[in-house]
Amino acid sequence: MRQHLILFAKAPRLGSAKRRLAAELGALAAWRFHRGTLAAVARRLGGDRRWRTWLALTPDHWPGGRRLVPHALPGLAQGRGDLGQRMARALRAPPRGPAVLIGADIPAVRPAHIAAAFRALGHADAVFGPATDGGYWLVGLARRRTMPGLFHNVRWSSPWALADTLRNLPAHRRAAQVARLHDVDTAADLVLSRLAAGAR
């Protein structure tokens, strides 16, 4: 069974993404960061033959997606609903096999992080990549991918997002975690992510 990586993001349209970052740095700087990071992550991960990479942008079928990424990545529709509903839909969409979903605001993510997540799914039902703010930058499910309710009542964009999701995990299902990384929602996050990149 093929492994599937899903890049899940808002389309990089000026004024519509990274609003917290835009409030501090301005809409143009936030747009440049979002567009540049999405393209860099797609370029870095999209050509890896260990998995098939899918692009799930909202709004669905945004025409700029094909020009933004260097590889001909197949698209997935996020559809309607809250963040959890759209994530669950994206994780169910690819053909059989383990699926890992990541955000596009993780400048430090590398193929080794994704490979580690797929290895973890060899012995766990779910895998998470914790973010430094209490959320998570990665979530993955093993090949069965049947975990209804996993994203119900999660306090998104809060320090409790990961804890809420783990609480929804059925008692008989096992979860693993991979590296803790910075996602970028604010100017302070951006500084921390650049310091972390410089330390490597």
Image: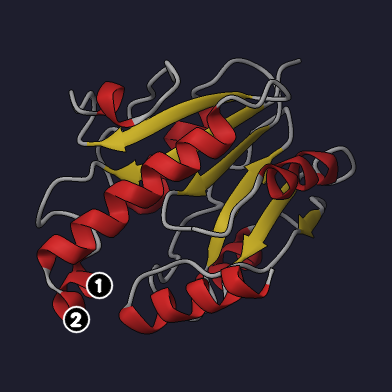
Q: CA distance from mark 2 to mark 1?
A: 5 Å
Question: Do the numbered discs 2 and 1 sit on residues whose CB atoms are within 8 Å?
Answer: yes
Vertical comparison of 12 with 194: above or below: above
Residue at 50% of width from left, 72% of height from top?
193
The residue lying furthest to the right in this view is: 123
Q: Quadrant of residue 58?
A: top left
Task: Choose between 128 and 32: the one closer to the eye.
Answer: 32
Residue 72 coordinates in the image, percent (x, y): 42, 15
Question: In the image, what residue occupies the spot 69% across and 20% down?
Answer: 49
Q: Position of residue 166 (x, y in %)?
A: 65, 64
The residue identified by callout 1 is 21
Q: Position of residue 129 (x, y in %)?
A: 65, 59
Residue at image location 43% in from the left, 64% down from the top = 153
Residue 37, placed above or below residue 185:
above
On the question of residue 110 being in view, the answer is yes
The amino acid marked with disc number 2 is Glu
Residue 185 image point, x, y percent: 35, 71
- Image quadrant holding the C terminus, namely bottom right
